[in-house]
Image (spheres, rainbow, N blue to C red):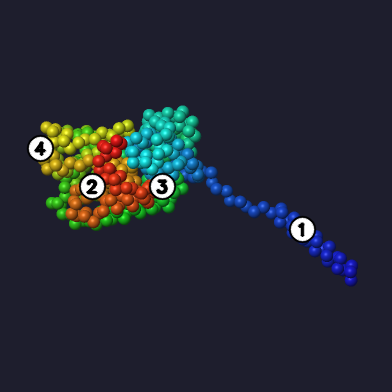
Amino acid sequence: MNRYIKYYLAAAVIMACLLIQAGCGTQTAVKTAPAEKTVVDMSGKTVKVPAEVNKIVVTCYGGATNEIVVLGAADKIVGQPSQENFPHLLKFEPQFKNIPDAGSFDNISVEEIIRLKPDVVIASVTSPKGNKKLEDAGIPVVTVLTGRATIDGLKKEFKMMGEVLNKENEANTLIGFWDSRLKMLKDEAAGLTADKQKKVYYMLGIPLRTDGSAWGQDFITTAGGINVARGVDNANQVSAEQVLQWNPDVIIMSSNIGPTKNHFIMADELKNNAQMTNINAVKNNQLYQCPIGAFWWDRPSPESILGIMWLARTLYPDTFANINLARETGEFFKTFYHYSLTDQEFKAFFNPQSAGE
């Protein structure tokens, strides 16, 4: 009997050893994250980017930096053009004051960008020469629309940037904010009859330059206005005779003329300009400087939905009386910039020439 017990015990030990060896010899498959992914940028090009983007160089203006900031990736920017035009942005992202500037658009330093070792460069669709230099150097380049956006194009860009940065939820929240306010604007503007719509001239940097197509068109018409320069390309010159013929009811004045310095047109300049004195907007003092928050409110960026609401209130204060711009702006800054805006800071947006003083 003892012999059988010993036999069964020995068999059990052998079986246990075999099971242990089998277990040791079996490796559980470990899923590894992909090293790369593909995105379709705003030029329609499919670009391979690292699955995890940790270092970004920006080579354009046009709100690209602000997109990265509001999506929660400001700390990933290692190089970009100076943000001196936007002192409010520098208040809550002070590290931007000391970030290397490797140039912008086609005027870039490829050597400096290589030194910064970015995972991706965010560049403009309008700088093909500079972008190709970077691509030839083996650096992934993702293009954005800069000033060539429409509202629909800008929302697609938010989604694309969310994919690049693995910030899809944040991008969807931003798009949701836009969609809810756009619906409100559309619903209120539906009550405007054709005889009440105001003709608007969008003055871009200097009196006889405008942006009538793409963004300029969407900016004005979404606010319920009639764009007198519809079809005029971005940053194009027009004649004084043409503006007089359009005879706009309202002139909105942008300080956006380029990447280095805001240029502010003052209302008195237009009132004293012999070419402008017979225009209804000038005669009736319907001349308004476009606000500047963390970016130009009249140019395409995450923040420009606030600019559209500002323009709607400016053109039709009664029709859009339900828009509380201070509340909307405070909510936007708190949600997307994670910054509690003071009343004084909000008011400064509407006196932009004093922002840097």
Q: Which residue is mark 2?
A: 311
Residue 18 on image: x %, y % = 77, 58
Answer yes or no: is residue 159 visible. no
Answer yes or no: is residue 323 visible. yes
Q: Which label is found at residue 18?
A: 1
The kind of residue on which mark 2 rests is Leu
Q: Which residue is mark 3?
A: 71
Q: Nearer the viewer, mark 1 or mark 3?
A: 3
Q: Earlier in the sequence, mark 1 or mark 3?
A: 1
Q: CA distance from mark 1 to mark 4?
A: 99 Å
Q: Quadrant of residue 264?
A: top left
Disc 3, SS: loop
Whether label 4 touches label 3, CB < 8 Å: no
Disc 2, SS: helix
Residue 274 on image: x %, y % = 11, 32
Q: CA distance from mark 4 to mark 2?
A: 23 Å
Q: Earlier in the sequence, mark 4 or mark 3?
A: 3
Q: Which residue is mark 4?
A: 278
Disc 1, SS: helix
The kind of residue on which mark 4 rests is Asn
Q: Quadrant of residue 14?
A: bottom right
The kind of residue on which mark 3 rests is Leu
> Is residue 268 toward the left or the right of residue 140 in the image?
left
